[in-house]
Image: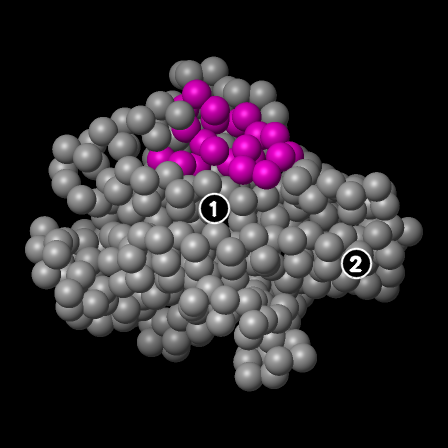
Amino acid sequence: MTVAGETSQASSAPAARRDTARPSPPRRLIEVDVARALVVVGVVFNHAVDGLVTSGVVDPASELASANAVLYMFRMPALAFLLGLFVPGGVDRYGTRTYLWQRLVAVGYLYLLWFYLQGLVEFFASGVKNHVFPSARFLSPWTSYGQLWFLPFLAVATVTLVAFRPWQSGRRTVVVLIATGAVSLALWGWNMEVLGLHGLSLLVFAAAGAAIGLGRMTVLVEGRSCCWALLGVGAVLGLLVLVNLGAAPATSGSVATSLPAASVSFVAAVCGILLVIALSVLIVRMAPFSRRFFSAIGTNTLPIFLAHVAVVAGVRIAMGQIGVTPGWTVALAVVCGVGGPVVASRFAIGRPTVQWLFVPPAQVRRWLAA
């Protein structure tokens, strides 16, 4: 997911001179694009399966639901980690004040816009979907719902990372990771539907991404393929073992998890993040067509994240009416939930009448630039 101030390109030359400890990437990090694609496809898959479980079509104990539960362990931590990678370069490129200003205004604009757009869709579809959307909810945009909670979290994480800058020195990295790790463990599973309070347990993953940055990530992904393959296999085994030990997702529930359970869950999330990175590296090196396919998705994660819920719900309802099996319904929902927003965002480029759906209007962009 890309918002104002993010790029997979190298930081500017002056920025590289200011921070010689962090190497500048010489190329676009396609591995990061692929990783973002894997994560956002997982998010779409999650909402497709959750909708079928909530409607009673899929048994919560089924293999499909169980696979979704395992993926849920690391989808959002991985997304937070990947977004954190862009913060150091954004600050170097635009400066602290400009970066924060552009990013916070863009996130706020998109949150409010899609809060009401998605709300209108759910309100008028209340008769055919799983939950009724009360009209009174339009009056409380500070209570986020659906996937939109991640946008306020992104704002909170951005301010936190820019304030403490874990990428500037080794000592600062250790201090920030320990502090955000303590916060994450203490709040694991505790989520309030209030702006900025949902998903605070993901802060440590965003901080880890910022501490590494795109420059160091470029060096890491140059590792040997056999090492990444072994790391991926180890991550899968570790994730499965920890899930069987009772690991729970960071962003589900509203009560903080006990420290032992949170620790197990944290390590499971780390295993999942390593798996995503390992898969991305191997896809880039060994599957040219898949690399181009996933890279195209990864550069459009924001439109997918914003618009996929309505598309997935529509596909699920339509397929339920004609009796399509759950497996095919999920597959079609994922294809449409990913492809539909990508096509819509590409169509919107350069068309002021619809471009405002995915980026702030021209007047707001001029205001940000000023």
Q: Residues within 10 Å of mark 2 (few under 14, many from 20)?
A: few
Residues at discs 1 and 2 in contact (Cβ within 8 Å): no
Residue 12 in the image: state x and y as whole percent.
21, 67
Residue 224 visible in this rendered orientation of the protein:
no
Give the mark nearer the N terminus: 1 vs 2. 2
- Residue occupying image coordinates x 43% and y 67%: 370
Question: Which color scheme does this rendered protein use?
Answer: one colour
Q: Is 156 displayed left or right of 316 in the figure?
A: left
Identify residue for label 2.
121
Residue 160 visible in this rendered orientation of the protein:
yes
Identify residue for label 1.
155
Residue at disc 2, secondary structure? helix
Q: Residues within 10 Å of mark 1 (few under 14, many from 20)?
A: some
The stretch in magenta equals 184-204
As drawn, the label of residue 260 is none
Q: Is residue 200 above or below residue 158?
A: above
Q: Is 159 displayed left or right of 344 in the figure?
A: left
Measure the C-alpha gap from mark 1 to mark 2. 25 Å
Residue at disc 1, secondary structure? helix
Q: Is 20 displayed left or right of 342 in the figure?
A: left
Residue 279 in the image: state x and y as whole percent.
34, 57
The kind of residue tagged 1 is Ala
Q: Nearer the viewer, residue 235 or 369?
A: 369
Residue 228: say if magenta.
no
- Residue occupying image coordinates x 73% and y 41%: 140
Q: Nearer the viewer, residue 212 or 6?
A: 6
Residue 224 in the image: state x and y as whole percent.
15, 58
Kindly indicate the quadrant of the structure image that contains residue 321.
bottom right
- Residue occupying image coordinates x 32% and y 40%: 163
Residue 263 in the image: state x and y as whole percent.
38, 23
